[in-house]
Image (tube, grey):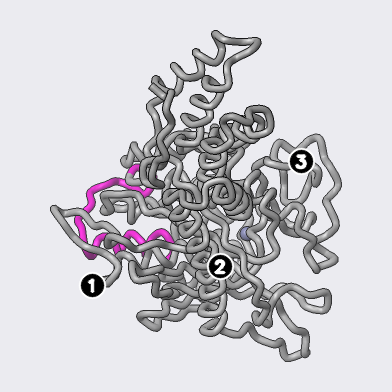
């Protein structure tokens, strides 16, 4: 059936074969070993490239690269699919090189010409989107404080950005923060404290909150269910590579953070930067080695898992029909190798919505890490379309913190779990005894989370932060 290769449109390549169809192609290859024919190898590579698994697409490109070298007679079709395969895995440089080589052999090949146009379009478009997002977010970004003693602070800036169907870039959330609460806080938090205050996680939480605001312009409502308006794509901007696996090779400019912690064989988790050389593993948030332990997972790990579960939290997932995914991660100073190991290689499951990396080279953000600066203890929450602003300190509104206790009355953040539930109750009745029962009632989401955590391995859960809903 594959004797006469036809050049598919890009659209066709997006339709993966079923596992059964791919197995037939692989069995054929196996049965012809040790010397499978070039056509059999080609067919299998074609099936792999159509797959939605990044690893399989890469394997397909690998086989085609070998065929290109060994089978002169197949060069034309191999070049075309090599270009398509490289395009699909986001390797535009090679995609372009291959299709240009094909056009040298066949200058009038229309499919090759339109493929080249698509590649060029994407290179330009993605480069522009990355830069546009960085510029847009930083332009509206808010300044961290300079302490009265003159010490400058640094913090991470993050934003969930909407890319509208006509490619308009609209920052929705702006958040800053680099702190996490220790695990023991969960025993008395009672749903009133925000535990993970890393900027990117706060942005996602705040975006969830925004989705539940009355008349949110990003959503449409049908048959009692919400969904994101069609054609909207989401990007997450972060001014530093997310902590954890993705940034293990990234040399931070902060001396304190550059020192790997002593390895302790007693610990069952990869805490922060411990075991520096282990790549592709789940880690907890970095922090000082003498600080109380937090089991909160690194932003790399949390974001990786969201490629499967979507970014909807327990609350929004209960009213949204479809899962909401991020399409792009926009961050500077990242090596593709680190990104692919962190986000692709270790999460090979069906139904994964792959993040694409967009990098930018625009360093107008003035509050990044530097040796003479100290990390800001504050976090800022801001919703651009509504103007909502709140400042957090120690997981509660600035000024409302009480040591070893929940915050003073009214001092809880607008986006703590309790207030998220309150927001939900304003649009929907819910009848659950407590928060955990509510959360566990969404079995689809819980099953996905479990599968993802198992795939990533060594995912140590934080203690529960439960509270009454009655
Ligand atoms: Zn982080």
**326 relative position to 273: left or right:** left
Q: How many marks?
A: 3
**SS state under label 1:** loop
Question: From the viewer's perspective, is residue 48 above or below residue 253?
Answer: above
Check if residue 430 falls in the magenta segment.
Answer: yes
Asked if the residue at tag 3 contacts the one at tag 2, i.e. Cβ–Cβ closer than 8 Å, the answer is no
Q: Which residue is mark 3?
A: 278
**SS state under label 2:** helix
Q: Position of residue 53 (x, y in %)?
A: 50, 37
**Image region (quadrant) for ligand 1:** bottom right
**214 relative position to 381: left or right:** left
Q: Residues within 10 Å of mark 2 (few under 14, many from 20)?
A: some
Residue at position x 65%, y 82% from top?
A: 364
Q: Can residue 376 be seen from the camera position used here?
A: yes
Residue at position x 34%, y 38% from top?
A: 444
Q: Which residues are magenta?
A: 415-437
> 167 or 37: nearer the eye?
37
Q: Residues within 10 Å of mark 3 (few under 14, many from 20)?
A: few
Question: From the viewer's perspective, is residue 114 above or below residue 24?
Answer: below
Asked if the residue at tag 1 contacts the one at tag 2, i.e. Cβ–Cβ closer than 8 Å, the answer is no
Asked if the residue at tag 3 contacts the one at tag 1, i.e. Cβ–Cβ closer than 8 Å, the answer is no
**Which labelled disc corresponds to residue 215?**
1
Q: To which quarter of the image does residue 162 belong?
A: bottom left
Q: Which residue is mark 2?
A: 127
Q: How far is the residue under mark 1 from the one under mark 3?
A: 46 Å
**SS state under label 3:** loop
Check if residue 456 falls in the magenta segment.
Answer: no
Q: Position of residue 214 (x, y in %)?
A: 24, 71
Q: Position of residue 457 (x, y in %)?
A: 60, 34
| Quarter occupied by the N terminus | top left
């Amino acid at each position: 059936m594959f004797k006469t290769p036809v050049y598919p449109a890009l659209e066709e390549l997006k339709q993966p074969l079923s596992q059964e169809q791919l197995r037939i192609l692989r069995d054929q290859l196996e049965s012809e070993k040790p010397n499978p024919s070039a056509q059999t190898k080609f067919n299998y590579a074609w099936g792999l490239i159509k797959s939605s698994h990044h690893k399989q697409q890469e394997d397909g490109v690998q086989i085609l690269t070998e065929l290109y070298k060994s089978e002169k007679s197949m060069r034309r079709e191999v070049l075309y699919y090599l270009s398509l395969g490289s395009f699909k895995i986001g390797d535009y440089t090679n995609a372009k090189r291959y299709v240009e080589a094909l056009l040298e052999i066949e200058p009038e090949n229309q499919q090759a010409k339109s493929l080249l146009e698509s590649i060029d379009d994407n290179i330009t478009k993605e480069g522009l989107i990355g830069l546009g997002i960085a510029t847009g977010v930083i332009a509206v970004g808010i300044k961290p404080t300079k302490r009265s003693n003159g010490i400058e602070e640094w913090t991470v800036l993050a934003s969930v950005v909407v890319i509208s169907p006509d490619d308009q870039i609209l920052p929705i959330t702006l958040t800053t923060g680099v702190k996490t609460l220790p695990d023991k806080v969960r025993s008395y938090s009672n749903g009133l404290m925000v535990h993970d205050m890393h900027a990117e996680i706060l942005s996602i939480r705040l975006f969830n909150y925004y989705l539940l605001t009355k008349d949110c312009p990003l959503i449409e409502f049908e048959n009692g269910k919400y969904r994101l308006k069609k054609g909207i794509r989401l990007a997450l901007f972060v001014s530093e590579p997310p902590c954890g696996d993705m940034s293990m090779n990234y040399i931070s400019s902060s001396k304190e953070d550059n020192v790997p912690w002593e390895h302790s064989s007693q610990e069952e988790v990869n805490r922060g930067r411990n075991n520096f050389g282990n790549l592709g593993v789940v880690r907890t948030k970095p922090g000082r080695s003498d600080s109380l332990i937090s089991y909160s997972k690194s932003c790399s790990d949390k974001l990786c898992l969201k490629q499967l579960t979507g970014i909807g939290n327990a609350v929004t997932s209960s009213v949204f029909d479809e899962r909401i995914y991020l399409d792009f991660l926009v961050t500077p100073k990242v090596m593709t190798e680190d990104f692919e190991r962190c986000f692709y290689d270790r999460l090979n499951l069906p139904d994964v919505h792959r993040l694409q990396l967009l990098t930018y080279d625009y360093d107008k953000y003035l509050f990044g890490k530097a040796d003479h600066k100290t990390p800001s203890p504050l976090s800022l929450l801001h919703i651009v379309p509504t103007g909502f602003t709140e400042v957090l300190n120690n997981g509660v509104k600035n000024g409302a913190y009480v040591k070893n206790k929940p915050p003073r009355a009214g001092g809880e953040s607008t986006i703590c779990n309790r207030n998220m539930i309150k927001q939900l109750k304003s649009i929907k009745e819910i009848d659950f005894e407590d928060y955990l029962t509510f959360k566990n009632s969404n079995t689809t989401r819980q099953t996905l989370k479990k599968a993802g955590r198992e795939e990533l391995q060594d995912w140590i859960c934080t203690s529960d932060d439960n509270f009454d809903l009655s």
